[in-house]
Image (tube, rainbow, N blue to C red):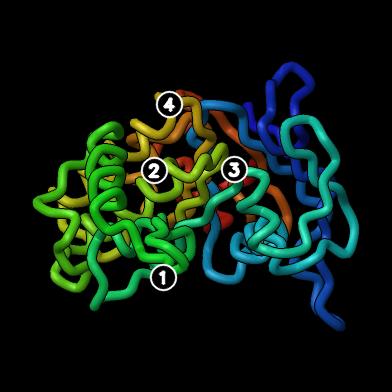
Amino acid sequence: MGSNQLLPDKDYLVRMENISKVFGTITALRDVNFGVERAEVRALLGDNGAGKSTLIKILMGVYQPTTGQIYFENKLVNITSPAQARAIGIEAVYQDLALVNLMSISRNFFLGREMTKNLGPITYLDIRKMNEVCKQSLHDIGIEIRSPNERVGSLSGGERQSIAIGRGVYFGAKLLILDEPTSALSVAETRKVLTYIENARERGLGVIFITHNVHHVYMVADSYTIIRHGMNVGTYYKGELSEDDIADLITGDRES
């Protein structure tokens, strides 16, 4: 059954060992061990204030751990910024998505990483190339769009999630962090987003799926790490727990 330790027989893409984080007199995390294998969907579960966001912000370089080490692809890393996290292959898709409503799908897809072409001394955005690559890249992971020129502001919540996930995959993410990706989506849109998550796993990516919805995570996750009061309650693998078991562990109604 569940363990709050990393297992020696697993091929972890990322390992976070004995992570603690102290803010003044508040201990947000205490000796948390957390890992994600290659081509695995790992759910990260816990109530508000449990420490999930702090752990992910440490992994993305927003915070530095007070104690503990992070290994990525079996190498000790010191991640000091989100840009550095992205450079080694860690991409986060947050609830607010960081998409610009008035810009097209392809412009958002390449935001900050635009393709350009030169005409003499003048550099132009290569809109045609960005449109082609955007549409083909999304198609390759099972995402169909009407037009890459369509404004992001006209898209549904599920479609916006798909663009953000597709962007991460295209730019070489090895580990994809999804923060509440199914929040406020319809049943049909949720099903699509869960399919995109499965497609990312099939392409060999590790996925961290952060959510409050036990039912959604139960459908696609290979394993579940539960955090409560800044501590790792345990990690469990598919088939070890029912949905009710997971919910009880999150709330503390059941001990690990």
Q: Which residue is mark 4?
A: 203
Quarter in which the C terminus is drawn: top right
Cβ atoms at labels 2 and 3 below 8 Å apart: no
Amino acid type at circle 1 is Ala
Q: Which mark is residue 217?
A: 2
Q: Nearer the viewer, mark 1 or mark 3?
A: 1
Cβ atoms at labels 3 and 4 below 8 Å apart: no
Q: Is residue 128 left or right of residue 61?
A: left
Other residues around mark 1 within 10 Å, as few (<14) / some (14–19) / many (≥20) = few
Q: Nearer the viewer, mark 3 or mark 4?
A: 4
Q: Which mark is residue 225?
A: 3
Q: Residue at x 66, y 53 (%)?
A: 85
Q: Is residue 32 left or right of residue 241?
A: right
Q: Residue at x 90, y 58 (%)?
A: 67
SS for tag 4?
loop
Q: Which mark is residue 129?
A: none
